[in-house]
Image (tube, rainbow, N blue to C red):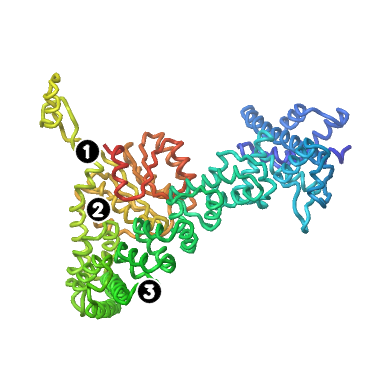
Amino acid sequence: MREAVRKKYPELLVRLAHTCRKLGLSVGTSEIVEAEKLLEVYTALKGGRIRPSEAREVVKAVFVKRSHEERVFEEAWSRVASSNEVFRELLDRVEEHLRTLRVGFGERIYSRRMLVSGADKATRERRRHAYRELKKMGIIVRRGGREAVLPRHIAMKRIAEISRKAHTASEALSRHWLATLEEGRGGIDPEMLRDADIPEQTLERLDADRLAELGMRAWRVGNKRLAYRAARRIASLVSSGVEPRNAEAVLELFQLTGVGDLHTYLRLARADPAMVSKVAKTLGPEVLATHLTSMDRESIERILPKLARILGPEETIRLVSTLPLETLEKLPRSAFKNTGRANEAFILAARHISKAQSLALRYLETMNEAYLNYAIHEHAKARELLDRLDPHSISPQLRPLYSHVKSLSETLPTSAGPPKELMAKLAPRIARMDLHQAFRILSSLYSSPNPEVRREAYRLAQKIWHARSTLLKSMVLRKWQKTSMRGRVELRETVYRVVRMQQDPLVYRKRRRSPGIVLAVDRSGSMVPYATWAVLTAFAFSRNVKRLVLFGEDVEVIEVARGTRRLVEVLLSARFGGYTNISAAMLEATQGLPPATLVLISDLKQTVQAESPVSVAECLVKSRWRIVVVAPPNRDLVVEEALRERGVRVEIVKTPWETGRRLARYLW
């Protein structure tokens, strides 16, 4: 009897003591031993069997020493007791399923078909269900090329692991199934997906690659409904900016289900340039080439080399005529060999000019004369080709680009000269560039060792900023608001009321007070593709920023004075890279300030082991802070959902111009 009791209670007491310690009740090893001995004696006096309530009172007499510890003990006991009940219920289910399949613990399964066979349809369905449930729980596993049921002691450990921290058997099974799907624990057996109906909440927690694997396996076993649901979920993720790692599997699932659209296919081509040929085969090379020009420069540079190899001569000429000149240096020469001699010579000259311009900018950034000499060499090769070329012999589609290349060839240097003179030649071209590209170039030039180049870069940045500030502020701030108090007359509204003969037609206006916001900009490595729009957003809010925080792994807090001089200088010298510590940035940004509006520009990817940004945001919201997150499409979806649940506004922007429009209603 004593040996039997010894086997029954130690595990329960150890788990109970561990739970008590977690809840703050100190339980020593000696007390566990004492409680075990008392249970042995009490069980022997009761004839070998006692009720759970009696066991609880015996253990309570040893573990609880003060009155306030009773509540902690009761909580620990309820947790351990509920897990034991779940364990017993799951064990009963497993034994019932094994009886249905006519096998026992530790037996090998020689034929799955024979295992699930039966005399009638109901018996076969019942056995298939039992088989799938045991596969989901991991009681039936594949060993040595054949399936087998786990031995009883290993199966009980598996059931104990599944039942841990669960209050019901259904909750334990759903958690285990979710962990299997998310982590691929033991792989996903296709038989488990034959009739599976996975909840939508579970699918929302899976990433695109896991969903693609799930959808493909479900399609192979005939569960097309699950495959369609997985494909639709992937399409929504890809449309929002998520780039799957296994784009080939995603593309195959889209082709099978027919779920993908033009936008999702273009996203897949950007995520994996090796997929360009397959995407072009699905959409057509002409369609892909037409929509390539609407992408950002980084996407064009990634897709262009692969796409150019599968285009015909006419499509290549049409594509070159619409692409930015700066991207042509990524165009392989083999792509335009068959476009005609004159067209080939011109595209080659455009490549040399594009390369010469980037090398000249690189020289100004580093003051390394090797870049300047290389730029002069590339420029000379381009001039030689252009001088021999008859403009009327090239394709009419390329003639607008010819004028652009010709003017640029007259601007670039033909010999070494002062950096200030080269900067003066390139400044008008930088000012006419796309705002995104212009600020990226100026930010790199601002790190040049030459003080003249730095001054010119700073002056040009201010010039570009003042030229665009009116448009940016008009999207963000509303300067005037209507009022009944005397002041300046709101002419449009007053005329409107007079024409309609309304009572009290005079309407006045007053200057709206700009709200002060705290701005936190993510400069970590994961934000490199969005570095420029983050800087532009900071420029847009420069005059009503109380505090600017630039953060990566470290946090830099900048008190912004009136005017833009200090802010422009800081943002031009900012370097993007490293890890991300969002929590520290939010705490530093709000420290010492009364509750206001915190605008966080980040992709929500915390890469530093620290307090969760979700918990920090929750504390700030409770302290009456208003938090607005401006995130790019490729953000952390789990953190975004958690922030939304805690009252944080999350705005997704695809362009820098959209940032101002989205934030306007939060900044009035």
The answer to which of marks 2 and 1 sits earlier in the sequence is 1
- Residue 450 position within the rendered picture, expressed as x and y whole percent measured from the top left: 23, 71
Q: Nearer the viewer, residue 436 or 368?
A: 436
- Tell whether label 3 touches label 2 (CB within 8 Å): no
Under tag 1, what secondary structure?
Answer: loop
Q: Nearer the viewer, mark 2 or mark 1?
A: 1
Q: Nearer the viewer, mark 3 or mark 1?
A: 3
Quadrant containing the N terminus is top right
Residue at the image point whose x is 26% and y is 62% from the top: 442
- Residue 194, quarter of the rendered image: top right
Label 3 sits on residue:
338
What amino acid does circle 1 point to?
Answer: Arg
- Residue 98 position within the rendered picture, expressed as x and y whole percent measured from the top left: 81, 41
Q: Nearer the viewer, mark 2 or mark 3?
A: 3
Report whether 513 appears left or right of 337.
left
What amino acid does circle 3 point to?
Answer: Asn
The answer to whether residue 377 shows anywhere in this view is yes
Label 2 sits on residue:
567
What amino acid does circle 2 point to?
Answer: Leu
- Residue 626 position within the rendered picture, expressed as x and y whole percent measured from the top left: 35, 37
- Residue 201, quarter of the rendered image: top right
Report whether 471 appears left or right of 519.
left
Quadrant containing the C terminus is top left
Label 1 sits on residue:
478
The answer to which of marks 2 and 3 sits earlier in the sequence is 3
Under tag 3, what secondary structure?
Answer: loop
Q: What's the CA distance linking mark 2 and mark 1?
A: 22 Å
Q: Residues within 10 Å of mark 1 (few under 14, many from 20)?
A: some
Q: Nearer the viewer, residue 329 or 221?
A: 221
Q: Nearer the viewer, residue 110 or 459?
A: 110
